Image (cartoon, helix red, strand yellow):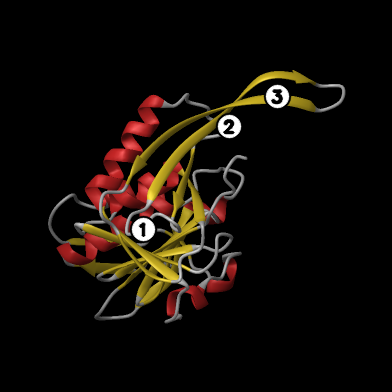
Amino acid sequence: MSAPKVYMDEAAVALLRATLYAASRDAARPVLQHAHFSARRVMCTDAYRMAVAYFDGEPLPDALVDARALRKALPRKGDWEGELVGDLAPYDALPVHYDHFFTRQRWTCSLTVRRVQLLRFLDDAAARLPKRRDDPPTVEVLLADYGSGARVRASVSTPIAEERATGWAKTEVEEYTSWLGHPFIEGEPFRSISFSLPLLRDLARVCTGDWLTLDLDDPAKPALVREAGISHLLMPRLAPR
């Protein structure tokens, strides 16, 4: 059976490429290393974040396509016509379902910031803080009690002493703090929400607008970012105490 073919114009290719960052790189979770084509949307997730792009035109075939191979096949510019080489699979093959987050209309609050300013802070924090592959820095966005502004604090915990027999460990927390200029906060903000710095930076990089709006419901629930033709979910992370 030959692989189904698809044609996408340049705008659709850009949307498709913008979803691939969310695919898993964990070889132990092979299904999540794929982009899922279904009807008029494509979805990628690594269970910590999710990106869904929506397309007009002819329905897409149901298929799971390796995200790394797809990234190499897509052109940087121009239209694309290619084969979806992968496994034909139903949506149930994916173990995570967050559709209700994409369709809900009411959120507790929303935070809108200049994307370039957020990226500058994340890049500075990544350069200043120690690098630990097993425990990347956490970014905490403090929403309440700061007037019309919001403060961001990036931190990383570094073990400085431990006793394996008892499991006791002492850590040193290093922080880098800044203000997010003049963001817009709407609704009823809670105190704060935290994210993995690398994952938040990936999201900010793949977005294209001058402003980035995070719809928030609860410190323990995903944040939603919507742009034309594409939506992103990012799971929160507990901030170090």
Left or right, 27 with reference to 61: right
Mark in front: 1 vs 2: 1
| Residue on which the image places disc 3 | 170
The image quarter containing residue 58 is bottom left
> How many numbered marks have been drawn onto this rendered protein structure?
3
Within 10 Å of the Cα at label 1, are there few (<14), some (14-19), or many (20+) other Cα atoms?
few
Within 10 Å of the Cα at label 2, are there few (<14), some (14-19), or many (20+) other Cα atoms?
few
| Residue on which the image places disc 1 | 147
Q: Quadrant of the C terminus?
A: top right
| Residue on which the image places disc 2 | 134
Residue at 31%, 48% in the rendered image: 180
- Sequence-wise first label, 1 or 2: 2
Left or right, 94 with reference to 176: right
- Residue 48 is labelled as none
- Sequence-wise first label, 2 or 3: 2
Mark in front: 1 vs 3: 1
Q: Amino acid at mark 2?
A: Asp
The image quarter containing residue 18 is bottom left
Q: Quadrant of the N terminus?
A: bottom left
Residue 149, percent from left and from top: 33, 55
Residue 226, percent from left and from top: 33, 68
